[in-house]
Amino acid sequence: MSFGVEDQAEQFFRSGHTNNWAVLVCTSRFWFNYRHVANTLSVYRSVKRLGIPDSHIVLMLADDMACNPRNPKPATVFSHKNMELNVYGDDVEVDYRSYEVTVENFLRVLTGRIPPSTPRSKRLLSDDRSNILIYMTGHGGNGFLKFQDSEEITNVELADAFEQMWQKRRYNELLFIIDTCQGASMYERFYSPNIMALASSQVGEDSLSHQPDLGIGVHLMDRYTFYVLEFLEEIHPASQTNMNDLFQVCPKSLCVSTPGHRTDLFQRDPQKVLITDFFGSVRKVEMTTETLSLDRDVAGFESKFPEEELATEPLKYAEQLPVAQIIHQKPKQKDWHPPGGFILGLWALIIMVFFKTYGIKHMKHVF
């Protein structure tokens, strides 16, 4: 019996990691790059829904589209043109914003070379048992990715940073995803072990935008991230979906560009790597052979929380409708309510017409 329990435990921890981290980076500024912020927040929403807490997410946004004066719906960022999915949500924790998003700060986060005064929320406190997801989006070219339209990181610098992470035992396995033009060029120079990389386009190809919105005036997402997000909406913490399935989410017929991936540095077979090994969170499990009765505890728990209270609890943004349902539903008919100024003006017009027609002596019939 003990052998069976040990075998189950070994299978459960087959990836060798005990914790998950995510570094999500949008490198673009300015309103016309709205889609890059939506890309990053969409991935942020997915990893939080699958269990990675904010304490294990480093979110870097080069511009705050939610508070941009050109945003017709302040405090929101939408990833779909019917404006049903607000990926900005109600509890987004941005760790690096605006001009804090630089190549230097990004490399310092990866390598751990940051000042002692840096708060914990801005640190990547990973170790040799950590699986790390690194997602980047912005404008790039052959061998580089621009930051803030003022500087750039090269594929050599990125490869060397990952090597420093490996030498300093800062990760167990690393998944790198990039959505940018000529994205595959960014993982060509990788040479450190246990890295799996995905890109939205090959060298010489552009990564195209998706979901144009006339009300906002810009595209809301990039094609590759749009289909990755739609794929992730079908994943739950107990899913057995593997990385090979992720490789197929956006064929050229949908993305127009040719997505690429690199697995030669990765020690495990991608078919045996679960999506939740990177997008989810490891849960501590204590195995026991004893039978436990939870009926009494469950009844006590339900008595503390009546059904009325549970029903009125507002949904968090990570618990909204699945994207697959949202993008296929028809836009809702909005009820028209006249503004307050319109009502006041209408009453003023009625009174003026009354005075002109009957004069002040007839006011007593009104009041």
Image: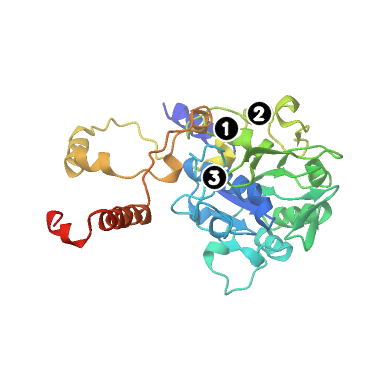
Residue 169, position in %: x, y? Answer: 66, 55
Label located before the other in sequence (1 or 3): 3
Tell me if mark 2 has few (under 14), some (14-19) or many (20+) residues whose alpha carbon lies within 10 angstroms of its own: many
Question: Can you say whether 137 is above or below 251 in the image?
Answer: below
Dot 3 crowding, Cα within 10 Å, few <14, some 14–19, many 20+: many
As drawn, the label of residue 78 is 3
Question: Which residue is disc 1 drawn over?
Answer: 230
Q: Residue at x 75, y 45 (%)?
A: 180
**Taking 176 as reference, is 310 left or right?**
left
Q: Which mark is residue 163?
A: none
Instruction: Answer with mark 2 or mark 1, whichever residue precedes in sequence.
Output: 1
Instruction: Name the residue nearer the viewer: 352 or 229.
Output: 352
Q: Earlier in the sequence, mark 3 or mark 2?
A: 3
- Whether residue 20 is visible: yes
- Say whether residue 190 is visible: no
Check disc 1: other Cα within 10 Å, few if <14, some if 14-19, many if 20+.
some
